[in-house]
Amino acid sequence: MGDAMAKSGLMINDIARGRVTVEGFVRGIVPGMTASVAGSLFASLAIFKRSEANLFRELEVG
């Protein structure tokens, strides 16, 4: 990072440190888990509504 900013004339520290907090963890994990669970739920509902014969026919073709 220091090499990229060497000619910019800005006074920036060469070291960038990430801060791990509970708030940041919750903001990252909760939406990710919610999206994953919701996606699986909607996909399973779509498969559940289809007939079993169609699902097996598609499985044999693929």
Image (cartoon, rainbow, N blue to C red):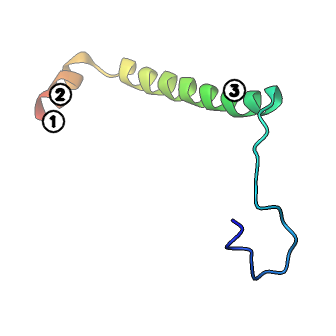
Q: How crowded is the residue under tag 3: few (<14 C-alpha within 10 Å), some, or many (20+)?
A: few
Q: How crowded is the residue under tag 2: few (<14 C-alpha within 10 Å), some, or many (20+)?
A: few
Q: Amino acid at mark 2?
A: Leu
The spot of residue 58 in percent (x, y) is 19, 31
Q: Amino acid at mark 1?
A: Gly
Question: Which element type, helix, strand or loop, lies under badge 3?
Answer: helix
Question: Given the current orientation, which residue lies at the most extreme right position?
Answer: 11
**Residue occupying the point 63% across, 26% down:** 34
Mark with earlier residue (2, 3): 3
**Residue occupying the point 42% across, 21% down:** 44
Up/down of 41 relative to 1, above or below = above
Up/down of 11 relative to 22, above or below = below
- The mark total stands at 3
Mark with earlier residue (1, 3): 3
Q: CA distance from mark 2 to mark 3?
A: 34 Å
Q: In the rendering, which numbered label is found on residue 30? A: 3
Up/down of 18 relative to 8, above or below = above
**Residue occupying the point 59% across, 31% down:** 35
Question: Disc 2 designates what residue?
Answer: 59
Please identify, in this view, whether the residue under mark 2 or under mark 3 is nearer the observer.
Answer: 3
Q: Are marks 2 and 1 in contact (CB under 8 Å)?
A: yes
The spot of residue 22 in percent (x, y) is 80, 26
Q: Amino acid at mark 3?
A: Val
Q: Quadrant of residue 62?
A: top left
Q: CA distance from mark 1 to mark 3?
A: 35 Å
**Residue occupying the point 55% across, 23% down:** 37
Q: Quadrant of residue 61?
A: top left
